[in-house]
Image (spheres, helix red, strand yellow):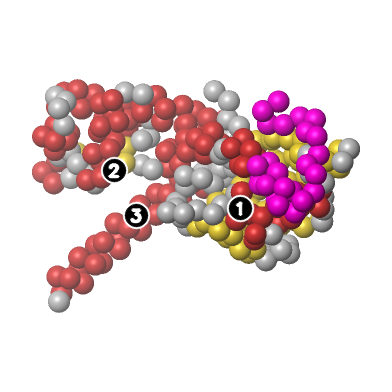
Amino acid sequence: MPPDTEAIAEQVFIALADPSRRAILAALASGGPATATDLAAGLPITRQAIAKHLALLAEAGLVTAEPGERRRVRYRVRSAPMQAAQQFLAALARDWDGSLGALQDHLDRTARRSGTTPLRQAQGRHG
Amino acid sequence: MGFPDRIERTVDLAHPPGAVWAALTTAEGLGAWFGNHAAIDLRPGGAAELSWAGGPAVALRVERVEAPRVFGFTWPIYGLPGDDPRRTYVEFTLEPAGAGTRLTVTESGFAQLPAGAHRTAYDGNTEGWAKELAELAGYLDAT
């Protein structure tokens, strides 16, 4: 695990901890590249606050600034850091406890159906 | 912040290894407890598929088959796009424990992220889409 991946994930979680930044990222993800002014028109956040959040997001590598028409800077989402954070979330989301519980129930049912006496459980998932 | 690469669980099952092995490696077994439907070609390199009612199907690749002790496969990382090449490796190990089975499952590879590779891959993807859309726009303009 390269240490910078952890740093990247941390930046993502810091960015997502703020509702205004979540709204900005969501707007860029769903609507495509936009300027701070475009974003201010669609969100209940002042243009000044949006500019501040965009600067933080750009520094974290979550958005990139690109020159647009009439020297207006447009921002677009960079998905790479999100993918780094997603690896972390994937490990949390994998529910082996639930699956192994289902396996145990399945084995109990199968044993009952085939008429074999279920063995006494020394240690079960409830134990 | 810890970044788990590996998940490991051990359970003692009150069923002999043969029964556990069948539940893990047959379409009937997998479709009963793991997914709602399953298909499996049980050999190293063989394909398997798990699907859930109203959900997506997941493609597995069988890696290790050593009946009735070790069963391993790779599958996609939860939450990543379906065409992402990265996969985690899942291995079930069965050990006789009295008349039952001690089952250990390990899933590893969550932290895999080739340095710099993700940047190329995903930025490349984004630019790829921008290019495709530009081409589509050009095509539509021309017709």
Asked if residue B133 lies in the magenta stretch, the reply is no
At x 71%, y 63%, the residue is B42
Amino acid type at mark 1: Ala
Height in image: B72 above or below A27? below
Q: Amino acid at mark 2?
A: Ala
Q: Position of residue A85 (x, y in %)?
A: 47, 35
Answer yes or no: is residue B111 visible: no
Amino acid at the residue labelled 3: Glu
Q: CA distance from mark 2 to mark 3?
A: 14 Å
Q: CA distance from mark 3 to mark 1?
A: 43 Å
Query: What residue is drawn where x is 42% and y is 38%?
Result: A82
* Separation of marks 2 and 1 at Cα, in angstroms: 38 Å
Q: Nearer the viewer, residue B82 or B68?
A: B68
Q: Which residues are magenta?
A: A103-127
Image quadrant in which the C terminus of chain B is located: bottom left
Please tell me if label 3 and label 1 are on a single chain. yes
Task: Identify the residue position indicated by label 2 in the image.
Answer: A29
Would residue B98 be visible to someone looking at this image? yes
Q: Secondary structure at mark 2?
A: helix
**Left or right, B101 with reference to A72:** right
Q: In this rendering, which labeled residue sits more in front, label 2 or label 1? A: 1
Asked if labels 1 and 3 touch by Cβ distance under 8 angstroms, the answer is: no
Q: Residue furthest front?
A: A115
Answer with the quarter of the image where residue B60 lies: bottom right
| Label 3 Cα crowd, 10 Å radius (few <14 / some 14-19 / many 20+) | few
- Residue B98 spot, x, y in % from top left: 89, 38
Residue A115 horizontal/vertical position (percent)? 77, 51
For disc 2, the neighbor class at 10 Å (few under 14, some 14 to 19, many from 20) is: some
The numbered disc on residue B127 is 3
- Local packing at callout 1 (Cα closer than 10 Å; few below 14, some 14-19, many 20+) is some
- In the picture of the structure, the residue carrying the numbered disc 1 is B32
Quadrant for the N terminus of chain B, please. Answer: top right
